[in-house]
Image (cartoon, rainbow, N blue to C red):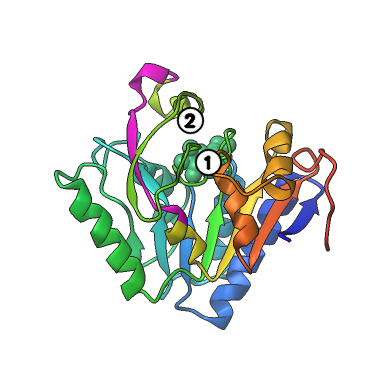
Amino acid sequence: MTRVRVFGGADALARALARDVATGLSRDPQLVLGLPTGRTPIPFYAELVRLYRAQRVDFRHATTFNLDEFLGIEPDDPRSYRAFMRHHLFDHVNLTARRIHFLNGATDDVRRECVRYERAIARAGGIDVQILGLGLNGHIGFNEPGRALAARTHVARLRPPSRHANAALFGNRVRAVPREALSMGMATILQARRIVLIATGASKARCVERMIEGPVTPRLPASFLQLHPNAEVWLDRAAAAAKLRITK
Ligand code: GLP
């Protein structure tokens, strides 16, 4: 069963996760981190920046891989996930540029780009800690609900709820949100040595309950975390509101 931790609020969760990552980096400065975008991790990134400024975390030897990127968007486009990460984290800490990895949404050869990413992850020795957000429809990265899930990094067709959820990046114009993205696959994610999924706010409660207690199904991609030997779900009280069997 997935281990669940419930925090008093989103800020407490963010502080604990940033401390956890800082501790991980002090034990293993070459830690390989998998990182998400979305609203949920913003306080966590802010807390990492704060710890860095207080000289309590050192990213110099760390490696990062982001989960996903919109297709057809240039890396330096302000609406890209790469720009999001620069704004919230990369521009404020001492990560080494060549160890920051991103899918290139502007590639003209998507197949090659996906293979390149898988190889880069393998060359880095795999992902030590994969941090995940949770889409309202149960997606992780951009592994959208469906009859089957892609195992490896692939082109994902975004479902309407995911395009809605990302509209803020595109001037709140849902129609401007790309219809496709590149995303790590489910097996890519599940190969991480440790996974921490974070979810905050009441809107996620129902999905969280299904993810933890429901069947493992491609209709709810996050439910596959139940199969991982070292997956944790970190929630604030609102996201944990549904009746959960909680292990501490
Ligand atoms: C996007 C990302 C996901 C993220 C999800 C949740 O769709 N591709 O990786 O987990 O948003 O976003 P939020 O944290 O804003 O709810």
Which residue does the numbered mark 1 point to in the structure image?
139
Q: Nearer the viewer, residue 93 or 24?
A: 24
Residue at point 73% right, 61% down?
A: 1
Earlier in the chain: of badge 2 and badge 1, it is 1
Q: Residue at x 44, y 78 (%)?
A: 30
Identity of the amino acid at label 2?
Answer: Ser
Give the structural element (helix, strand or loop) at label 2.
helix
Helix, strand or loop for disc 1 = loop
Circle 1 crowding by C-alpha within 10 Å: few under 14, some 14–19, many from 20: many
The residue at label 1 has a CB less than 8 Å from ligand 1: yes
Extreme residue toward the front, this view = 147
Left or right of residue 248: residue 83: left
Q: Position of residue 47 (x, y in %)?
A: 61, 55
Quarter of the view holding residue 22? bottom right
Badge 1 amino acid: His
Dot 2 corresponds to which residue?
Answer: 162
Callouts 2 and 1 close, C-beta under 8 Å: yes
Whether residue 165 sits left or right of residue 10 in the image: it is: left
Q: Position of residue 51 (x, y in %)?
A: 59, 63
Give yes or no for residue 184 being in the magenta stretch.
yes
The CA distance from mark 2 to mark 1 is: 8 Å
Q: Any mark on residue 23, and which?
A: none
Q: For the residue carrying disc 2, how many other residues have a C-alpha within 10 Å: few (<14), some (14-19), or many (20+)?
A: many
Residue 31, how many percent across, how many down?
48, 74
Q: Which residues are magenta?
A: 172-186
Query: Relative to 174, is 178 above or below?
Result: below
Ligand 1 within 8 angstroms of badge 2 C-beta: yes
Q: Is residue 25 above or below residue 138?
A: below
Quadrant in the picture for residue 136: top right
